[in-house]
Amino acid sequence: MAKGKTFSKPKALSDAHTHYCPGCTHGIIHRLVAEAIDDLGIRGRTVGVAPVGCAVLAYNYFNCDFQEAAHGRAPAMATGIKRVRPDLMVFTYQGDGDLASIGLGEIVHAANRGEKFTTIFVNNAIYGMTGGQMAPTTMPDQRTTTSPFGRKADEVGMPMRMAELLASLATPAYVTRQAVLRPKHINKARKAIKQAFTYQVASRCFTFVEVVSTCPTNWGMTPTDAIDWAEETLLPYYPLGEFKVPE
Amino acid sequence: MAKVLMKGNEAIGEAAIRAGCLNYFAYPITPQSEVAEYLSRRMGEVDGVFLQGESEVAVSYMIFGAAGAGARVFTTSSSPGISLMSEAMSYIAAAQCPAVFVNIMRGGPGLGGILPSQGDYFQATKSVGHGDFRLLVMAPASVQEAVEMTMQAFPLAEKYRNPVMILGDGLIGQMMEPVEFPDHLKVEPVDNSSWATSGMDHRGSKTRNLVKSLFLDPAALNNNNLVLKAKYERMQREEVRWETYNGDGDYDALIVSYGTMSRVCRTAIDNMQAEGLTVAMLRPQTLFPFPEQAVYEAATREQCRVVISVEMSMGQMVEDVQRSVKGHRPVQWYGKCGGEVPTPEEIVEVVTESLAAN
């Protein structure tokens, strides 16, 4: 085993302290993305696109070029960047309100055109920054500030499975759902995120990594209870794995 | 280069390429779809980027992304589509990126109609999107001028790092006229290394760039708005453009009109001159900045008794004319919309009646 330092901050992360709540998994996902950027040595030609939502300030935490989108429009901005500068490595980092609700059109069409950027989709089944409102990914009977008696599927439908939806399109080639609940999940998520960027470096295809995540604050749980609830409630409905891989 | 006969929409597309803009994103809408049709073929010939987006909303953010990455980029649309793009224009202005939007106006409100109109004057010059920002707005009156303004729009957008709008009515887009393309503009690559997300390696920098419009700190947001305000004030000092017609000597009335409407007014003015009635016209070529001082001076000539704003709308520019004249002369409006264009005979009648009453 190599001696010396065994843990260090990826170069693609800045020194800024994040504003994320205790127990929030955004920090883990940020790190996994930054590690992939470092591993591939692409920091100097990477442009991230931040969403509107809890990760709106993601540009403060990554140490590479960044643009900040309007709510839901990150895939359109990434399309613009990648089309005029195919040599840049472009990724969007979006939550479930941003991507699955207001930005549904943009993500579906960017995926269907096969835009050669990477989307990191953080699914925690709720709106975070606006204070815990119901999202398209909110589970049946899950209480939120706009579904105080629980999500009623007969009124607002069942949660949307974005990875499956995008995998139903013929064009996109890498669609996977991962989680960051337990170390085993995190290790797999790290590999998937690096794989997505690797495909992009090779100009292969649109790449999409959904990451099942937690929101202890808006779920009203301790961080550990949130992980348990996500495992028991989210994972059965949002199965992990690869839905599409390039041929 | 020899003159060629071209439809306005196609000429605008060609003009952008001549100005060194090789990136175009668009969504079809009548009466400007010929720009996209033309460029879908032409961009391939010049190794440019053409992409038909899924909506005007998406297209406007493709423009934002591309502009943010440092590319020269533009789109074209028509009134309802421009409404959908107006959100992105606000973000682009806030983030101080250069981009060109062409609005080939059709009648509104709502779906309105597909015939020419000037009903988007307020939208273009006063409040295209939310927040404190402005567009630099140029209004061509011929296909030739549409070409020239399109070519000038890119350096202006880059000078101010702000969206520029070409505001043409549907006639400008749809009619065919002889047009001569100036040689390729000598547009030097803009140094955008201080702000564009062009990649740190690309610009040989160790510091990253951010393109954003979020300023949570009130003082920072106020400061950003002051920076924008200073740019708009500079536009008012440096970019105001207009021309006059029949205005060298004395005249009894002044018409203010822009775009295609101004050409009908010229015919009316010629007809009145033949009858011994001298009427002048001031044609704003920039709508923001509006030629306030020029309108004031033209309106307050000793013999001029009345000022009439003639528009293909229900009276929008007339408010800027009134503001410019400052009550020194009576200002009235005449116009039609929905695709109906005031005729020379109607304009003569309005001017004659107005002079009789004042």
Image: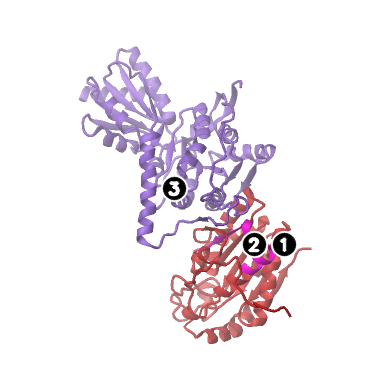
Chain colours: A red, B purple
Q: Amino acid at mark 2?
A: Thr
**Which of pointers 1 and 2 lies earlier in the amino acid sequence?**
2
Residues under labels 1 and 2: Cα distance?
9 Å
Question: How far across and down, in percent of the image, does residue B78 sit?
Answer: 50, 42
Which residue is depicted at the point 50% across and 37% down? Answer: B155
* Residue position for label 1: A199
Question: How far across and down, in percent of the image, does residue A24 sit?
Answer: 52, 77
Q: Amino acid at mark 3?
A: Gly
* Residue position for label 2: A118
Quarter of image, res A230: bottom right
The numbered mark at residue B110 is 3
- For discs 1 and 3, the disc positioned in front in the rendered view: 1
The numbered mark at residue A163 is none
Of residue B19 and residue B9, the one placed in the foreground of this image is: B19
| Residue A239 shows up from this direction | no
Which residue is depicted at the point 61% across and 69% down? Answer: A10
Residues in magenta, as a range: A33-51
Tell me: residue B182, above or below residue B119.
above
Chain letter of the residue carrying label 1: A
